[in-house]
Image (spheres, helix red, strand yellow):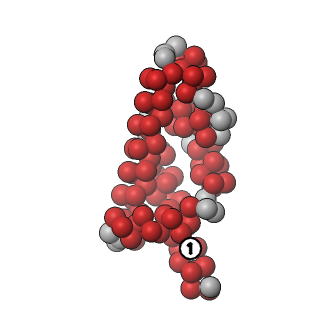
Amino acid sequence: DPELDLLRATYKEEFVAAFRAAVLGLSRRERTILRFAFIDRLTPAEIGVMYGVHRTSAMRWMDAAQAQLLSRTRAGMMERLRLSRSECDHAISLIKSRMDHTIGTLLATAR
């Protein structure tokens, strides 16, 4: 469907911009932990060893960083596109399947 493809393309560009801003708004530790988890595929136990903390602490850090990232991305998209929360969630679901590579690239390059 060409109309759906146009919506996906529009949302993807806005998502990338909002996601990039959200990633840059995270602390260095939060960005690093997300890279370890999603790029390097490290477990919470492995991340915990690297930071000298229990795996439960590392898991809490991961969860908090992911929550911040989603919240900031959603807020950025809602502002940019003037969407309601449900419209924004729908937009994210439209592009989600095509975003894995982009998200990985953004996390890998955001230091």
Residue at 44% across / 23% down in the picture?
Answer: 57
Camera-nearest residue between 80 and 11 = 11
- Identify the element where label 1 is drawn: helix
Quadrant showing the N terminus: bottom right
Q: On screen, 6 above or below 37?
A: below
Residue 20 spot, x, y in % from top left:
51, 52
Task: Rate crowding at label 1 as few (under 14), some (14 to 19) or many (20 or more) other CA atoms within 10 Å.
Answer: many
Return the residue found at the far bottom: 2
Observer able to see residue 25: no
Residue 73 lies in what quarter of the image?
bottom left
Residue at 44% across / 37% down in the picture?
Answer: 63
Q: Which residue is mark 1?
A: 8
Residue 44 spot, x, y in % from top left:
55, 27
Residue at 60% across / 79% down in the picture?
Answer: 5
Q: Amino acid at mark 1?
A: Arg
Residue 37 lies in what quarter of the image?
top right
Q: On screen, 74 above or below 53?
A: below
Camera-nearest residue between 45 and 107 = 45
Camera-nearest residue between 111 and 6 = 6
